[in-house]
Amino acid sequence: MIIRAYLRASTTEQDATRAADLLRSFCRGHGLMITTTYTENASGADSERPQLRRLLSEALDGDVLLVESVDRLSRLPQPEWEMLRAEIKTKGVRVVAVDLPTSHQAMSPKAPGQKQGLSDWMLSAINEMMLDMAAAIARKDYNQRRQRQAQGIEKAKSKGLYQGRPRNEVKRKKIAELLTSAQWSTRKISGTVGCSTSTVQSVRAELRGAGLLHP
C-alpha cells in the first residue's frame, strides 16, 4: 500500500512538519509505513498548493492520502472542496485523517480479488459524509478567524495602535530576484518563497515602477 503523507502549515513561521511523528506512529499502529511525504507552508484556502498538486499528480489508484486532520487538506469554499474531492475520488485515492475514525478503514488493505460488500459501501458513504462535514467545519473556522482578525485590526486602528504587518524584506528580495531572472508564474514564486500571491504582485509593481521589470 502506498501512503502519501501531506503536511501543511499556513505560514513560514509555523512548523509544517509538526505532525510528522504523529503520522508515522499512526501508520506503525496499522503495520504500515509512509511511502512519501509532501510538506509545504501554504493556506488551506488555496487549492493550487504546489506540494498538494505534486501529490495528486503522482498518486495512483488505491493510494492513501494521509493527513493529521481534514483542515490540513482543505479550508476551501464548498465549490472548490467539491472539485478537489472529485479529483481525489476520480484518481481512486483514499483520504485518511488521523482524527477522523471513519476514514481509518482505508488503512486495511483488501486481499487480492476480495470484493467490496454492503458494509464496505455503507462505511465508504458514511466516511464521504464525514469528510464533507469536516471540510465545512474547517472552512467555517477559517472564515471566523479571519473575521475576528479583521475586527481586531479595525479596533486597533480606531485606537491608533495598528501599524500593519511588517514587510519581510528578505522574502521580497528573493521575489525580486526570481521576477527579474526567471520566467516564473506568480503562483510558482509564491509557493517557492512561501508568501502570498499578493506579495509577489506587490513586488512586481514596485519593480515595474522603478523601470526594472517590463510589463
Image: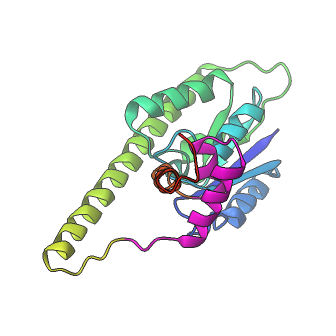
Image location (x, y in percent) of residue 137:
37, 47
Per the picture, the main secondary structure of the magenta-coloured stretch is helix
Residue at 83%, 28% in the rendered image: 111
Image location (x, y in percent) of residue 75:
44, 46
Is 21 in front, or is 181?
181
Q: Is residue 174 magenta?
A: yes
Q: Is residue 3 above or below residue 40?
A: above
* Image-quadrant location for residue 141: bottom left
Q: Residue furthest left?
A: 158
Q: Which residues are magenta?
A: 165-194
The figure's colour scheme reads rainbow
* Image-quadrant location for residue 15: bottom right
Q: Is residue 75 above or below residue 39?
A: above
Q: Is residue 4 above or below residue 59?
A: below
Q: Residue furthest right?
A: 112
The answer to whether one can see residue 26 in this image is yes
Is 11 in front, or is 102?
11
The answer to whether one can see residue 119 in this image is no
Residue at 64%, 68% in the rendered image: 18
Q: Is residue 98 above or below residue 58?
A: below
Horizontally, residue 167 falls left or right of residue 190, namely left
Image location (x, y in percent) of residue 178:
67, 53
Residue at 75%, 29% in the rendered image: 62
Image location (x, y in percent) of residue 80:
45, 32
Is 152 in front, or is 196?
196
Q: Quadrant of the N terminus?
A: top right
Q: Is residue 192 magenta?
A: yes
Horizontally, residue 154 falls left or right of residue 102, namely left
